[in-house]
Image (tube, grey):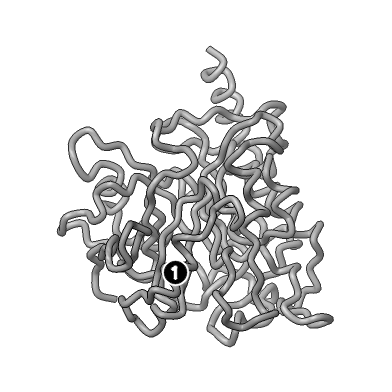
Amino acid sequence: MHTRFTLAFCLAATTLAFPSPPEEPCDYGLPSIWKPGVKWQIVIHAPVDITQSVIPLDARVWDIDYFHALDHPDIIPALKSPADGIDNVVLCYVNVGAIESYEDDYPEFPQDALGKSYEDYPEYWVDIRRPDVVQFMKERIIKAAEIGCDGVDADNIDGYDQDEEGVDKTGWNLTRSDVIGYVKSLATLAHNTPTHRGVPLMFGQKNAPHIASDLVSIVDFAVLEDCQGLNGRLPGVHEAYCPEFQAFVTGENRTDGKKLPVFEIEYPGSLEGGSTELTINDWEYYCNRNKTEVGNEGFSLVLKHESGQLDGWGQYCQSEVEMGQVRTATLPI
């Protein structure tokens, strides 16, 4: 009865352009596998080829590109149920803090809200303070629920964080409070938007460790990149930050005590350039250190190519360095 009442509140709130936060969090009628430590796979670079066997079959959470799901509507149902009796969770990667020029909805985006390019890619930081930008991204989130996504992996929410002291990377001089307010607005909309399961859409935090404590009771999961650090590469440029998210898996800092999955991606240097030969040094560093000391106890870890591509290849930590490699079949792009 409580779940039905809460969901009714969530559904009613979807009629508002800028809904107010519900007085109590929405319940999530997800499979029992949705918990810290669940095995996952992330494939963003190309659409998953569902004419091939889904590998790894024991990955119970999948993270795929929103636009791939739009263009290939059979992918989400196939990943949710790759075999009899399996009910997987599918998350959709959505860029909410920037926009890429090749994305299908780019022509509809207000051009005067485009900021600096992201690391010289045809991707531009957006002015998240503008109501029309907020509404644009909210429409992406609503569409994600409509096409079957269970949650949104919301990227580039760290525009406030200066890579270099005194250098504004976005062109908008965003503040920490700007970003927190923006994420809360998007997360509230997600929680008031029904999925195909008839339960609220989940909203995830991508990286941004400095605001983890502000968002732990707002978001539903986290996706982290290189939170263990770089194993001696680029000292002083990228520091480890896994411990900032330990409260997600323990639930200790959430108002409802709910334990949230944290999905960890690490890019070992030995896997650079498409290599699949993980070195003993990287295997020891990423797989065999004390998790309590590293701060990633209970995280769902996958190793990926050091290429930024997030293709179908991945490796899971097992008892031998050469074990745990998988390759999810993808379509040509």
Relative horizontal placement of residue 231, taking residue 157 as reference (left or right): left
Question: In the image, what residue occupies the spot 61% across and 80% down?
Answer: 118
- Of residue 80 and residue 68, the one placed in the foreground of this image is 80
- Quick one: which residue is furthest to the bottom in this view? 120
- Of residue 322 and residue 185, the one placed in the foreground of this image is 322
- Of residue 7 and residue 40, the one placed in the foreground of this image is 40
- Quick one: which residue is furthest to the right in this view? 166
Relative horizontal placement of residue 266, taking residue 315 as reference (left or right): right
Q: The disc labelled 1 sits on which kind of residue?
A: Asp
Relative horizontal placement of residue 125, taking residue 199 as reference (left or right): right
Question: In the image, what residue occupies the spot 71% across and 63% down?
Answer: 128
Question: In the image, what residue occupies the spot 60% across and 70% down?
Answer: 98
Q: Is residue 142 visible?
A: no
Q: Position of residue 88 (x, y in %)?
A: 33, 41
Q: In which quarter of the image is residue 270?
A: bottom left
The residue tagged 1 is: 104
Question: In the image, what residue occupies the spot 36% across and 74% down?
Answer: 278
Q: Can residue 64 be seen in this view?
A: yes
